[in-house]
Image (cartoon, helix red, strand yellow):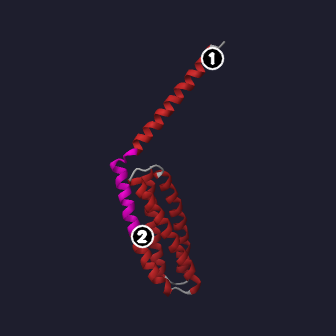
Amino acid sequence: MTSATTISTRGRTTRLAAVSLLAVAMMLGACSAPPAEVEQYIADAQNQARAIEGDLQRLENQVASVPDGLQAAVTSAVASAQAATDEARGALVRASDSRDGAVESLNDAQVALEAASAEVRFVTAQAREDGIDEVADLLSRLQEQIDALRGETESAAA
């Protein structure tokens, strides 16, 4: 025999499950076509990624003029920034196409960009200590661009 409490609990559980499924279905529907605001975030982030490419090229041209002790650190920071930017670009393509996993890809890209930003910040400080101001200025600009891209990908993922 079932009690009134069991029937009442079962009814609440069923309603909760139905509401949860409805919420998931609504989110999936919302993800299938990005609103204009999200599309703008994606476009801004793609422009930011292109700006980073220019900074990376300028830094690669300057690496030869950096003392050997710092050269490896600059090269590593540039490689990290390039990899994070490439990851962000891939995530942005997924987001613009509204493909499954786009939000996860954007979140992963944010983590990679944050790590690259930290490495670039560290190498910038080293370059400033060594008096290599031109490279430090380029690295500082790169770090600002990476942080801006991270913000744009965060907005696109929201």
Q: Is residue 143 left or right of residue 33?
A: right
- Asked which secondary structure carries label 2, the reply is helix
In the image, is residue 6 above or below residue 52? above
User: In the image shown, does 87 or 112 lie closer to the viewer?
Assistant: 87
Q: Residue at x 50, y 59 (%)?
A: 110
Please tell me which residue lies in front, 140 or 119. Answer: 119
Residue at 59%, 84% in the rendered image: 69
Please say if 21 is above or below 128. Answer: above
Q: Position of residue 18 (x, y in %)?
A: 50, 29
Q: CA distance from mark 2 to mark 1?
A: 62 Å
Q: Which residues are magenta?
A: 32-50
Residue 146, how many percent across, how many down? 46, 66
- Identify the mark nearer the N-term, 2 or 1: 1
Q: Residues within 10 Å of mark 1 (few under 14, many from 20)?
A: few
Image quarter (top left, top right, bottom left or bottom right) of the N terminus? top right
The residue sitting at 48% across, 50% down in the picture is: 101
Residue at numbered disc 2: 52
Q: Which residue, given by chain and number where applicable, does mark 1 sit on?
A: 5
User: Is disc 1 placed on a helix, strand or loop?
Assistant: helix
Chief secondary structure of the magenta portion: helix
Q: Residue at x 57, y 86 (%)?
A: 68
Question: Is 43 on the left or on the right of 86, as rendered?
Answer: left
Q: Residue 115's x, y, as percent?
A: 55, 65
Q: Quadrant of residue 9?
A: top right
Name the one closer to the observer, 32 or 72: 32
Residue type at mark 2 is Ile
Q: Amino acid at mark 1?
A: Thr
